[in-house]
Amino acid sequence: MKPKKTNIAPASGRLALLLPGMGAVATTLIAGVEAIRRGLAPPIGSVTQMGRIRLGKRTEGRSPLVKELVPLAALEDVRFGGWDVFPDSAYDSAVHAKVLEPDLLEQLREPLSAVKPMPAVFAPEYVKRLHGTHVKKGKSKLELGEMLRADIRAFMKAEGCERAVMLWCASTEVYIEPSAVHGDLAAFEKALAKSDPAIAPSMIYAWAALKEGVPFANGAPNLTVDVPALQQLAKEQRVPVAGKDFKTGQTLMKTTIAPMLKARMLGLQGWFSTNILGNRDGEVLDDPGSFKTKEVSKLSVLEHILQPKLYPDLYGHFDHKVTIHYYPPRADNKEGWDAIDIVGWLGYPMQIKVNFQCRDSILAAPVALDIALFMDLAARAGMKGIQEWLSFYFKSPMHAEGLYPEHDLFIQQSKLKNTLRHLAGEELITHLGLDYYESEA
Ligand SMILES: NC(=O)c1ccc[n+]([C@@H]2O[C@H](COP(=O)([O-])OP(=O)(O)OC[C@H]3O[C@@H](n4cnc5c(N)ncnc54)[C@H](O)[C@@H]3O)[C@@H](O)[C@H]2O)c1
């Protein structure tokens, strides 16, 4: 019997893509979508734009594009809005970020100049290296949240948008642990009204989005929506949430190589990871509080993939170090090194070296686009709360209480694809494949 197709509202009308933080990632995303719309470049790196998905048996030859299988918003229907602590338009911010060639930016000057950030909700104690001036003033954090809600409504009205998604692309905030004020919605809203210091600016944006019925995803490692209070609000409002921290360079590599080591029962003695990065993100991460947030996000992946408790002989004692060095000459062109000390048959040591000379925002932009379009799909499909099937895109995937996060890129990919098949009423693929070899005779 064929599985039941999920009732998904059509992707008709315009979609507002609301971006707190209009820096390197956000402007590379906006410029990229504008370039793709004009046929100036292909959407490389985007699963929603280029990916195909196998359906049915291998003998059936059915592999439609993902966007043919499920109804996704068309790029032509996306309208960009956002907030930043600097008043620069997306054009000026993209010029400052130096990710894209001046030639391309010049061709996109008009649409990018039209995207101007709204004044931000900002607290310097949460991002110590920034001194922005383009910020809202309010009597309380609750009032600031209400201002963001008014911004969302005004933007959607002005741009004629029927739906919206908010995607945090702003700086990494300092590390905080969940506390009582994040424990349930009533405590959270009380704390908002009292401007409790434990309510981070990113949480105010998330609260405002959810109150407006707008899905919220977090591209940075901040706690933000990963607290019971905001998850309760997401469920009550029947809105999807996802996060945290775009999985782009070194962690993408790590969550690809570590599953291979485990699949072949190769041991690990140590994994030394370091990066040099010279953009504003690198500058913000030079502050120990913001780095701690990133470090926790980057360190968690190996423990969960390698399961040292289940495999103490192979993974019981490995060293894992991660550092990021702010090095301005490299700007957005991050370079990451991994020195991996592994152990093989009879305990013989071996080494793997990875030198990834990447471009941070070039890797992040298609991930940001996919997350936004899939979050909109989830909302139209009536999916609410944590969207674990989007773990594929995150360094620290959000997960239900009592579960461990799934970090293995290939398990994450199966989860993503099977969720799409499930939504479309197609058979899930288990890769068992015995039926190809069973004959009647
Ligand atoms: N590029 C990647 O590969 C990658 C991967 C994972 C996570 N991230 C995260 O994505 C985020 C964006 O990265 P980026 O390279 O674009 O950084 P960026 O510094 O270029 O841009 C961040 C922008 O956010 C603004 N900002 C800070 N606080 C704000 C607030 N409260 N409200 C509104 N705007 C605010 C800053 O002024 C800045 O313009 C960072 O948190 C980064 O750690 C990036």
Image (cartoon, rainbow, N blue to C red):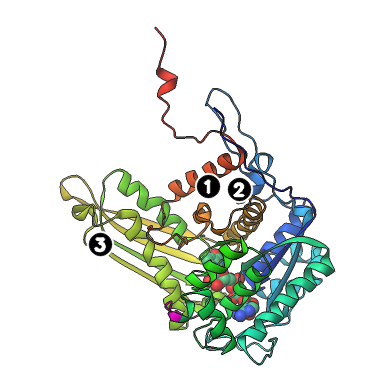
- For this orientation, the residue located farthest to the left is 346
The disc at residue 318 is: 3
Callout 1 amino acid:
Leu
Identify the element where label 1 is drawn. helix
Q: Residue at x 51, y 51 (%)?
A: 389
- Disc 3 crowd, CA 10 A, few/some/many (<14, 14-19, 20+): some
In the depicted structure, whether residue 102 falls above or below residue 61: below
Inspect the magenta stretch and tell me whether residue 179 lies in it.
yes
Ligand 1 within 8 angstroms of badge 3 C-beta = no
Q: Count every numbered label the image shows and give the total.
A: 3
Task: Answer few, some or many: residues within 10 Å of disc 1's Cα (few below 14, many 20 plus, some between 14 and 19).
Answer: some
* Residue in the foreground of this view, choosing between 263 and 346: 263
Of residues 103 and 302, the one nearer the viewer is: 302
**CB contact under 8 Å: marks 1 and 2:** yes
In the rendered image, residue 228, in percent from the top left (x then y), is placed at: 48, 70
For the record, the magenta segment spans 174-180
Tell me which residue sits at (51%, 88%) in the image.
Answer: 197
Q: Which mark is residue 416?
A: 1
Left or right for 354, reference 64? left
Cα distance between the residues tagged 1 and 3: 30 Å
Q: Amino acid at mark 2?
A: Val
Query: Along the polypeptide, which appears first: circle 1 or circle 3?
Result: 3
- Between the residue at mark 3 and the residue at mark 2, the CA separation in whole angstroms equals 34 Å
* Mark 1 or 3: the one toward you: 1
Horizontal and vertical percent position of residue 117: 73, 76
Q: Is residue 215 visible?
A: yes
